[in-house]
Image (spheres, grey):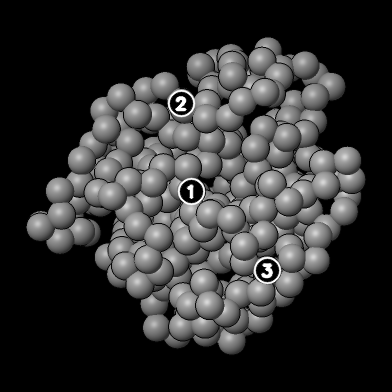
Amino acid sequence: MTRSTATSTAIADAQISADHPFAAHLRRHVDLSTRQPSTAWTPDSGPLPALYLSHGAPPTFEDAAWMAELYDWAAGIPTPRAVLIVSAHWESTSIGITASAPTELVYDFGGFHPMYYRMRYDTPPAHALADLVRAALPQTIDVHEHTERGLDHGAWLPLKVMFPDADIPVLQLSLPTDDPIRLLELGSRLQSLRDEGVLVIGSGFMTHGLPYLNWHRPDEVPAWSVEFDDWAAAALARGDVDELADFRSRAPGLPYAHPTVEHFTPLFVTLGAARVGETVRTSVDGFAMGLSKRSLTVA
């Protein structure tokens, strides 16, 4: 397929078979962005929203409907100056950021087609974003830059679907704890970045009970996945952050929906970045491989 710019990302994308669903997704992107170019964020746009997104593994690139949902969601937001994303796939007891100069992606998945290990998402340098992150956090916190660490698939995979041109600076922030209160506090520190045109994203999966799925029936949605998703949706609709923060005691189906909790807890960074009076709305819902795709906009 032909792309309009010969970036390293576009060159790699051009090697994807034309009949692959992601190649079709890229063609749709070119068509839509040509007919209706995106609007860049300016201070007059007001603060960008904060997002929580549910992401999958490489098979997401084979799910045309899910890719369209993610892309159309992003297209409804002014193009950010930068993206700061917290992923379930980088837990650290201290706060770190990925390299602010472009470096290799982290292909932290196994057993998939070789094409997925050749994918690129080479974004512009993010030095200015790194400075904003450090300024937003207390001086007592040493934000260590991991100069050889690139984005993991919890970051680059959904962003590649949502912003395929890879022309927005991106940094990933480590997930320093699974304590919802501390993550809410971290999110509140990042709230000011939204006024600077930075899209703050918590990336996880609303349910993530991989060991308990029926892989012979990918269309089957387990009861525990539905029950957890319904509980979270109801609490979010009420704005009941206390209920959500006490998920270990209150969430139905938790041991199955989240055998480990790192795909749920990025939600609290997103909620912490909310302002008084803002609301949470579901922007993507439904299930994929039995797991809840529920993804949220806070604005």
Dot 2: few (<14), some (14–19), or many (≥20) neighbours within 10 Å?
many
Under mark 2, the amino acid is: Leu
136 relative to 84, above or below? below
The structure residue drawn at horizontal position 79% and vertical position 31%, both measured from the top left corner, is: 21
Nearer mark to the viewer, of 3 and 2 = 3
Specify the quadrant of the image occupied by residue 194: bottom left
The residue tagged 3 is 253
From the viewer's perspective, is the residue at label 2 or at label 1 nearer?
1
Could you say where residue 233 lies in the image, as x and y percent from the top left?
Answer: 66, 75
Whether 27 is drawn above or below 43: the answer is above
> Which quadrant would residue 297 be assigned to in this image?
bottom right
Residue 47 seen: no
At 67% from the left and 60% from the top, the residue drawn is 256
Above or below, 41 against 61 in this view is: below
Task: Please tell me whether residue 93 is drawn above or below residue 11 in the rendered image.
Answer: below
Dot 1 crowding, Cα within 10 Å, few <14, some 14–19, many 20+: many
Residue located beneath label 1 in the image: 88
**Residue found at the far left of this picture:** 140
Residue 105 tag number: 2
Q: Which residue is rendered at x = 40% and y = 69% of the image? A: 180
Q: Are marks 1 and 3 in contact (CB under 8 Å)?
A: no
Label 2–label 1 contact, CB within 8 A? no
Q: Amino acid at mark 1?
A: Ala
Q: Nearer the viewer, residue 224 or 74?
A: 224
Marks 2 and 1, the one that precedes in the sequence:
1
